[in-house]
Amino acid sequence: MITVATVLARLPGLDADRLQYWIAQEWVRPVRRGGEVLFGEIDVARLHLILDLQELEVGEGAVPVVLSLLDQLHESRRHMRRLLDALDAGAAEEAVRRLRTARPDGSLKRE
């Protein structure tokens, strides 16, 4: 986790007022600990994205729409990854089951 000062140092196109505005708009959601605002790497990536959107002259009203769509896309990718992992685990379990029920000649026993 990094501080506001570190974020501002890493993102030269960003100033403290704009950062505070983006936090107030909930375009980025840093963690607050003991009165200190801390950012994770995902927050820094999101700030880079917002800066890029502004450089592309995406209107302020469109920024939350773009961020929401990207959040939905990432959530869908996470679900897909979990589904693929579950399918892979199921395939592995099936292969182990088949090996356990195989005859010495490699043919399968009827269950």
Image: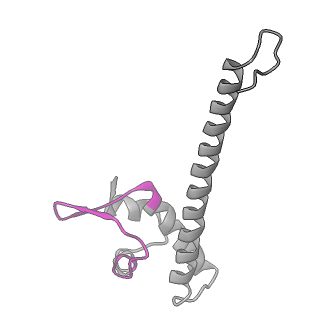
- Residue 77 lies in quadrant: bottom right
* Residue drawn at 82 percent across, 18 percent down: 107
Residue in the foreground of this view, choosing between 78 and 94: 94
- Residue 47 drawn above or below residue 106: below
Across and down, in percent, residue 32 comes to 25, 63
Single out the residue that lies furthest toward the top.
104
Magenta-colored span: 22-42
Across and down, in percent, residue 14 comes to 45, 72
Q: Where, quadrant-wise, is the C terminus in this rendering?
A: top right
How many numbered discs? 0
Across and down, in percent, residue 43 comes to 43, 62
Any magenta on residue 39? Answer: yes
- Residue 106 drawn above or below residue 26: above
Any magenta on residue 38? Answer: yes
Residue in the foreground of this view, choosing between 38 and 76: 76
* Residue drawn at 66 percent across, 19 percent down: 100
